[in-house]
Structure formats: C-alpha cells, structure tokens
Image (tube, rainbow, N blue to C red):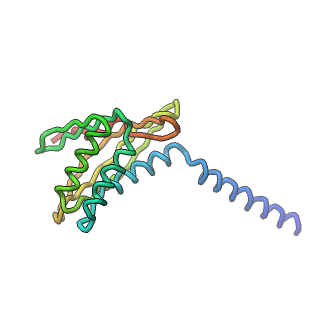
C-alpha cells in the first residue's frame, strides 16, 4: 500500500516537473506561434480605440520585426507594396490605423518549420482580414521568415503568397 502511494506521488511529481519545464522553457515552435498570434492581436484595431491607442499599436507592431525587415504585399485588385525596415512599417501602420474605423486580423492554419540551427523559422498561414463595418473579409495566404537574434524571435520577411486565379 505504501509503495503504491509513493509511486503515485512520484508520478505526480514527475508530471508536474515536466509541465513546469515546458512552461518555463517552451519549444521554439510554440514561441513562434505565440509571436504570430501577438502580431495579429496588435494589428487589430477596434472602432472605439483612440488615436493614442492606435499610435501605440502601430509602434508596438514594429517590435515583432527585425530592423531590416521586409514586408511585401501583393493583393489581387490592389497595387503591390514593399516596406523596408521598421520605420516604414510603423509609418504605414500609423496611416492605415488612422484611416480605418476598425481592422480585425487573424492568422489561421499556422504551420511552423524550425530550421536545423534552431535560429530560423518559416511560417505559413492564412490571413483573414476585415476592415471597417464591412461584414465581408479578405483571405490571403502569408509566408513569414523569422530569425532568432539576441534570444528574441523577429520577423525578417513577411509576404503574401501569389495564388492561382
């Protein structure tokens, strides 16, 4: 009886220890997924957000990008845009957040591939974006390249994926 209790207690401690280890030291894939989710949350602006909140969100959005990051957007029916560097990303976000009443961004079906060196990552997902009071939404495949520098994962390149039409 005592051995059974000891074994059960030992198993509970082992399971708790493993869980604590995964919370304190998450896998690179889990960290990258959390960053991509945070990008979507930060890029989402509600109709009631003040101009100060919108400016803060635009500035906070650049934290996820490397200094020399590139964003390439090619959406059907729109002119293509290439943004280079954090400053241009922030300025574009400021302009977009100011001109839209609201913006909702979601990244669905996120697939993460961590490089063999554990310092790079490739992320593929589907962006679902709705702007203003419009009930319709746009769907676009996205591809992110990320790199770990100084212990922090940053987006080095984000681009829309050309699909067959």
Tally the numbered discs.
0
Residue 94 at what x, y percent from top left?
24, 50
- Is the residue 83 above or below the residue 16 in the image? above
Residue 164 in percent (x, y) is at: 19, 39
**What's the residue at 29%, 59% (across, down)?**
52
- Give the quadrant of the C terminus: top left
Snapshot quadrant of residue 163 = top left
140 lies above or below 105: above
Q: Which residue lies furthest to the left in this view?
A: 77
Q: Is residue 139 left or right of residue 155?
A: left
Q: Which quadrant is home to the N terminus?
A: bottom right
Name the residue furthest right. Answer: 2
Indicate the position of residue 65 as horizontal and vertical percent values.
37, 41
Pick out the residue farthest to the front.
Answer: 52
Tell me residue 69's x, y (percent): 33, 35
- In this view, the residue in front, 140 or 87, is 87
- Give the residue at x 65% y 51%: 21
Residue at (22% x, 40% y) in the render = 73
Please tell me which residue is depicted at 59% across the width and 54% down the height of the picture.
23
The answer to which quarter of the image holds residue 98 is bottom left
Q: In this view, does 33 lie to the left or right of 51?
A: right
């Amino acid at each position: 009886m005592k051995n059974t209790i000891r074994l059960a207690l030992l198993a509970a401690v082992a399971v708790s220890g493993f869980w604590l280890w995964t919370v304190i030291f998450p896998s690179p894939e889990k960290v990258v997924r959390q960053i991509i989710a945070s990008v979507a949350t930060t890029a989402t602006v509600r109709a009631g957000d003040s101009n100060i909140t919108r400016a803060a969100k635009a500035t906070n959005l650049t934290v996820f990008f490397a200094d020399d990051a590139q964003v390439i957007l090619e959406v059907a029916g729109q002119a293509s845009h290439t943004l280079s560097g954090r400053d241009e990303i922030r300025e574009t976000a400021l302009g977009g957040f100011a001109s839209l009443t609201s913006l909702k961004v979601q990244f669905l079906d996120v697939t993460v591939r961590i490089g063999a060196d554990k310092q790079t990552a490739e992320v593929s997902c589907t962006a679902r974006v709705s702007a203003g009071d419009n009930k319709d939404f746009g769907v676009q495949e996205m591809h992110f390249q990320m790199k770990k520098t100084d212990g922090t994962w940053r987006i080095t390149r984000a681009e829309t994926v050309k699909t067959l039409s």
